[in-house]
Amino acid sequence: MRRVDRVGIVEAHTACESLYDNDGIARSRTQADAVDYNETVSSESQKLICEREAVLGSNIRQFVCLTVAQREYLQQVAQENSRLIFEAGNRTQDPAQ
């Protein structure tokens, strides 16, 4: 790959990253970044938890960081969605409803 092509790819990747909403939290690239960020916040709910997660359609794991509050919110939404799906399934199976 020519140098010009690599520079273009890096620029495009950087531009795409700016499209994501970061809620005022700097994007962490390493666990050390997350540790540094956690030292600057006083609220436990704002501390970052980072994990390497499998990305659908890729064999490359992605470093994903969310605050404790974001993780709790996503867990609540997932539980609510699961409950709604379960209830909808029960309504379609029960002729009395």
Image (tube, helix red, strand yellow):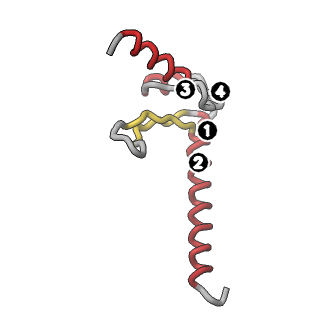
Q: Left or right: where does residue 27 sit relative to residue 6?
A: right
- Which quadrant is home to the N terminus? top left
Which residue was labeled with disc 2? 72
Q: CA separation, marks 4 and 1?
A: 14 Å
Above or below, 95 relative to 19: below
Q: Is label 4 in a helix, a strand or a loop?
A: loop
Q: Position of residue 62 (x, y in %)?
A: 41, 35
Q: Looking at the picture, which amino acid does disc 3 mark?
A: Glu
Disc marking residue 45: 1
Disc marking residue 17: 3
Q: Does the CB distance between marks 2 and 1 fall below 8 Å? A: yes
Q: Does the CB distance between marks 3 and 1 fall below 8 Å? A: no
Q: CA separation, marks 3 and 1?
A: 24 Å
Which residue was labeled with disc 4? 24
Question: Which of marks 2 and 3 precedes in the sequence?
Answer: 3
Q: Which of label 3 and label 2 is nearer to you?
A: 3
Q: Does the CB distance between marks 3 and 4 fall below 8 Å? A: no
Residue at coordinates 62% horizontally, 61% vertically from top-left? Answer: 80
Above or below, 82 relative to 71: below
